[in-house]
């Protein structure tokens, strides 16, 4: 006969969809109620990702129905873990800061940063995008945004928004988009400091920073100014790109910036007949991942629409939500989120869900 102890015993071994440990033991299954054959479960997930939610729903439903439950109602609380925020942190409302780096110009770093940001937003996260490439800002063009930010209170600047993403770039402040920024180091540092401290980013799950190529001042400034969750390293497969990206990886190690993973851009081209061509070589991304001791998050194919949509200010993830390249970027975003969540979990001891905050939603499983 179905009763509450029977149901609880059936749910005890159900594994968390991210951490693969029993949900009740680590605190992701918070409450179990039973009314007849209807079970009401209150759970806590570390991400609003539909994939994570679906996996949790399927596992709990299967376990409950094995003991006679006919309906399961899930009260889902999403709490995204947060980095260690110190008292002088310039963006205390930002739970995770991700640097997108390459060490090499022309590998598609900004394209990756933009589409990765949009993919994180499609997974349900609150996201922001900071164009930290002061001398060569690309975000205004790629996101199709122009106009100058305003300050509502006379103290802090409100970031511009499009596609649900908050954005800031030096490009928004230039009177002429072709105008060159001719600044020495101190002015560069001052601008980056303002973009962090004086912009009202609000509460974000992820703030993605598109860094300039190379191993110069910007990465050093970011490492000194705030607690960075980690770095996504972008490369193309060919050897000439790898040599510069190796240097960026080494710099991250020296600055104690965790490398969350590697994205290999322009990995291959598929012709109309279905043949695959490795135009820039093969295996470069995996070489960087091995050197960085980090996972290869994904390989982005060469598709003309990626360039076209970026030029139009309507990135591929937004323009073709069901397209092949969008699916790859969503996969990269999910792999990145999972890596971030597991790193937080291990950092806090690996016994209980890491701390965070988020909205509560109600989902019904039948």
Image (cartoon, helix red, strand yellow):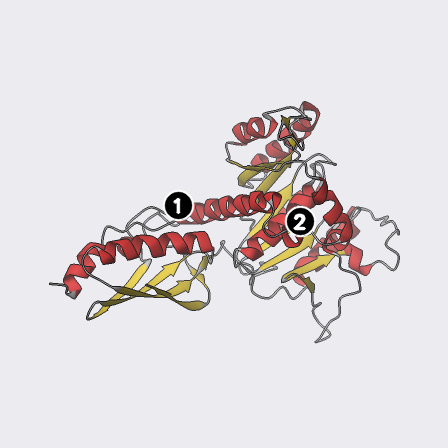
Near-viewer residue (196 or 63): 63
Any part of residue 223 in sight: no
Name which quarter of the figure residue 107 lies in. top right
For this orientation, the residue located farthest to the left is 1
CA separation in Å, label 1 and label 2: 34 Å
Image position, residue 111 (x, y; %): 69, 45
Disc on the earlier residue, 1 or 2: 2
Image position, residue 301 (x, y; %): 63, 36
- Residue 55 appears left or right of 217: left
Image position, residue 178 (x, y; %): 88, 51
Report which residue position mark 2 lands on.
316
Near-viewer residue (189 or 134): 134
What kind of element bears circle 2?
A: helix
Report which residue position mark 1 lands on.
346
Near-viewer residue (50 or 196): 50
Image position, residue 76 (x, y; %): 38, 64
Of badges 1 and 2, the one in the foreground is: 2
Quadrant (top left/top right/bottom left/bottom right) for the N terminus: bottom left
């Amino acid at each position: 006969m179905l009763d509450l102890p029977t149901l609880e015993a059936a749910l005890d071994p159900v594994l968390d969809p991210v951490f693969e440990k029993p949900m009740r033991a680590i605190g992701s299954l918070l409450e179990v109620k039973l009314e007849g054959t209807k079970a009401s479960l209150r759970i806590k997930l570390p991400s609003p990702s539909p994939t994570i939610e679906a996996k949790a729903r399927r596992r709990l439903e299967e376990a409950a129905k094995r003991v006679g439950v006919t309906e399961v109602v899930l009260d889902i609380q999403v709490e995204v873990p947060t980095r260690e925020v110190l008292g002088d942190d310039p963006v205390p409302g930002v739970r995770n800061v991700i640097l997108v780096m390459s060490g090499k110009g022309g590998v598609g770093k900004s394209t990756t940063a933009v589409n990765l940001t949009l993919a994180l937003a499609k997974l349900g996260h609150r996201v922001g995008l900071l164009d930290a490439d002061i001398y060569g800002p690309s975000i205004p063009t790629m996101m199709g945004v122009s106009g100058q930010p305003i300050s509502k209170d006379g103290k802090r600047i409100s970031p511009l928004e499009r596609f649900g993403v908050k954005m800031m770039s030096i490009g928004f402040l230039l009177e002429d988009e072709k105008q060159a920024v001719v600044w020495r180091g101190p002015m560069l540092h001052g601008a980056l400091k303002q973009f962090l401290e004086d912009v009202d980013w609000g509460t974000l799950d992820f703030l993605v920073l598109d860094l300039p190529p190379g191993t110069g001042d910007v990465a050093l400034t970011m490492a000194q100014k705030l607690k960075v969750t980690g770095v996504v390293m972008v490369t193309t497969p060919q050897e000439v790109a790898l040599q510069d990206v190796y240097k960026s990886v080494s710099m991250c190690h020296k600055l104690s910036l965790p490398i969350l993973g590697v994205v290999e851009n322009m990995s291959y081209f598929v012709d109309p007949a279905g043949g695959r061509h490795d135009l820039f070589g093969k295996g470069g991304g995996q070489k960087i991942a091995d050197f960085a001791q980090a996972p290869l998050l994904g390989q982005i194919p060469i598709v003309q629409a990626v360039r076209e949509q970026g030029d139009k200010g309507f990135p591929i993830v937004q323009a073709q939500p069901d397209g092949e390249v969008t699916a790859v970027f969503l996969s990269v975003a999910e792999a990145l989120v999972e890596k971030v969540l597991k790193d937080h979990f291990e950092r806090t001891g690996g016994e209980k869900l890491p701390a965070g905050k988020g909205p509560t939603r109600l989902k019904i499983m039948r």
